[in-house]
Image (cartoon, helix red, strand yellow):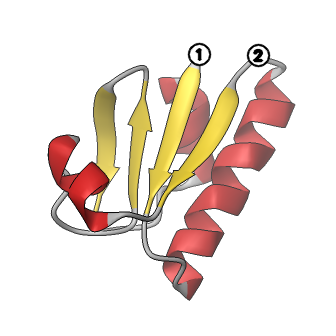
Amino acid sequence: MEIKICGPGCASCEKAERIVREAVAEAGVEAEVKKVTDFADMARLGVLSTPAVVIGGETKCVGRVPKKEEVLEWLK
């Protein structure tokens, strides 16, 4: 499973990445978590607001930090 965290590296983006990594570890799933910091790459993903979380090519969250419970649901 591929998970992309989109954002330039602001505090909210860092928090989103930390929450996603914690959820992946807690769920025990095998996933590659990548950071996307290039705005052109984000636009290609359809992300116009950050932070954003994209799992398996599907945008799950845009413009806010997700709750860990949400991420755990997305990983099921």
Relative image position of residue 62 (x, y in whole percent): 27, 57
Q: Residues within 10 Å of mark 2 (few under 14, many from 20)?
A: few
Left or right side of 5 for 27: right
Residue 54 percent location from the top left of the image: 39, 38
Density class for disc 1 (Cα within 10 Å; few <14, some 14-19, many ≥20) is few
Contact flag, marks 1 and 2 (Cβ < 8 Å): yes
Q: Quadrant of residue 9?
A: bottom right
Q: Position of residue 26 (x, y in %)?
A: 84, 33
For this view, does 55 lie left or right of residue 46? right
| Quadrant showing the C terminus | top right
Identify the disc placed on residue 1. 1
Q: Residue at x 79, y 47 (%)?
A: 22
At which x and y percent is residue 68? 62, 49
| Circle 1 SS class | loop
Q: Report whether 52 appears left or right of 1.
A: left
Which element type, helix, strand or loop, lies under badge 2?
loop
- Tell which circle, 1 or 2, labels the residue nearer the N-terminal end: 1
Estimate the spatial distance between the alpha carbons at disc 1 and disc 2, rounded to whole Å.
7 Å
* Residue type highlighted by circle 2: Glu
Of the residues shown, which amino acid type is indicated by label 1?
A: Met
The answer to whether residue 69 is above or below residue 51 is above
What label sits on residue 30 in the rendered view?
A: 2
Residue in the picture at 61% in, 32% down: 72
- Report the residue at 30% width, 26% height from top: 58
Residue shown at 57%/62% (left/top)? Answer: 16
Question: Where, quadrant-wise, is the N terminus in this rendering?
Answer: top right
* Residue occupying the far bottom of the picture: 11
Q: Nearer the viewer, residue 63 or 69?
A: 63
